[in-house]
Image: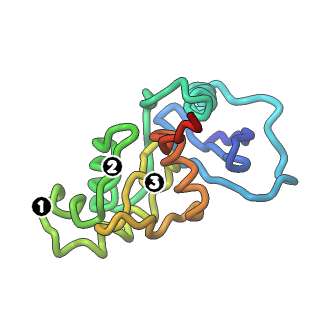
């Protein structure tokens, strides 16, 4: 398993994976966390695509993914990939799409354990009332990501 750390507008992101695909992307607050001088070949596409995403130049990732989790978690994470860029869905709606609206807590738990921060867009899941409920990376990051994908309308002064 190879790892690399890159600087992002939201902190230092650690990427890990191998030829089977990207296994996780974590975010660190600490600015003291060392950034990788060289990115392993297996992780270059992920690092490059993340940088383009943060610049607003990329709306969807084209990467081989290999997250580790239960079958149910993987089902939830795969369903997250269906949420379009700039759009959101609720935990309840996600549960319905998975075939069991009573599984809302299990879906929320799986969403919170998503190991592929941003790439599998768990930040696009919000509360049924539109609130920014829960985000492993912190609600300030969730809001930042949603604003990047769907900037708030700026009112004109004139």
Quote the CA–CA distance across marks 1 and 2: 14 Å
**Residue at the image point whose x is 54% and y is 24% from the top:** 57
**Residues at discs 3 and 2 in contact (Cβ within 8 Å):** no
Point out residue 46 in the picture as x, y percentages from the top left corner.
57, 32
In this rendering, would 48 be left or right of 67? right
Q: Which residue is mark 3?
A: 123
Q: Secondary structure at mark 2?
A: helix
Disc assigned to residue 80: 2
Give the mark nearest the N terminus, 3 or 2: 2
- State the scheme by which the image is colored: rainbow
**Residue at the image point whose x is 57% and y is 25% from the top:** 45
**Residues at discs 3 and 1 in contact (Cβ within 8 Å):** no
Q: Quadrant of the N terminus?
A: top right
- As drawn, the residue found furthest toward the front would be 158
Q: Along the line of sight, which residue is nearer the eye, 52 or 67?
A: 52
Q: Quadrant of the C terminus?
A: top right
Disc assigned to residue 99: 1
**Residue at the image point whose x is 54% and y is 65% from the top:** 136
Point out residue 19 in the picture as x, y percentages from the top left corner.
52, 31
In this rendering, would 123 be left or right of 27? left
């Amino acid at each position: 398993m190879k790892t690399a750390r890159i600087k992002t507008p939201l902190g230092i992101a650690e990427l890990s994976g191998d030829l089977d695909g990207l296994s996780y992307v974590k975010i660190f607050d600490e600015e003291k966390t060392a950034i990788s001088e060289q990115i392993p070949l297996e992780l270059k596409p992920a690092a490059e695509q993340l940088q383009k995403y943060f610049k607003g130049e990329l709306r969807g990732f084209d990467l081989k993914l290999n997250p580790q989790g239960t079958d149910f978690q993987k089902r939830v994470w795969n369903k997250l990939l269906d949420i379009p860029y700039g759009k959101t869905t609720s935990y309840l709606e996600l549960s319905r799409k998975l075939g069991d609206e009573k599984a809302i807590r299990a879906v929320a738990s799986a969403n919170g354990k998503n190991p592929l921060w941003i790439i599998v867009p768990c930040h696009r899941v919000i509360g049924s009332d539109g609130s920014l409920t829960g985000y492993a990376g912190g609600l300030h990051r969730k809001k930042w990501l949603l604003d990047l994908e769907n900037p708030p309308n700026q009112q004109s002064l004139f």
